[in-house]
Image (spheres, rainbow, N blue to C red):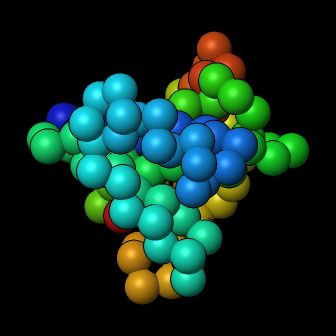
Amino acid sequence: MVKRSIVHIEIPVNALETDTKFYADVFGWEIVHMPEKDYTFYNTGNFEGGFMKVDEQVQPGDVMVYIGSEDIDADLKAIEAAGGKTIIPKTAIPGAGWFAWFTDPTGNKLALYT
């Protein structure tokens, strides 16, 4: 079995342009707002991730860990065979790749990214 890396971590925030300032001020992270995508990235110096807006599907505390995948469809089949569940099927991120959300058998929300 090939070991998989964590490739992205998203942190929920109420307001992208103001709440992300906390991470810049406290931890020194570089924050890059992308208004055209309604998304904000962070760079810690050795890891990059992003912030997602709190909404009906994403609540405070729902930090999303993205695991690298070469074949999201195959991984979702393996996840479901092992007792997990697909929350969001393979979905395009225009100009960036593909993702899917799933739960493990305990109910933890995680994601795949390619």
What is the residue that sits farthest to the right in this orientation? Answer: 56
Quarter of the image for residue 41 reads bottom left
What percent of the width, then of the height, locates residue 5? Answer: 23, 39
What percent of the width, then of the height, locates residue 102? Answer: 61, 41
The answer to whether residue 90 shows anywhere in this view is yes
Q: Report the residue at 54% width, 64% height from top.
A: 39
**Looking at the image, is 104 positioned above or below residue 72?**
above
What percent of the width, then of the height, locates residue 60? Answer: 70, 28
**Looking at the image, is 31 positioned above or below residue 39?**
above
Q: Report the residue at 86% width, 44% height from top.
A: 56
Q: Is residue 8 left or right of residue 103?
A: left
Q: Is residue 111 left or right of residue 2?
A: right
Placement of the C terminus among the 4 image quadrants = bottom left
Quarter of the image for residue 61 reads top right
What is the residue that sits farthest to the top in this orientation? Answer: 106
What percent of the width, then of the height, locates residue 26? Answer: 35, 27
Q: Report the residue at 37% width, 62% height from top.
A: 32
Q: Nearer the viewer, residue 19 or 48?
A: 19
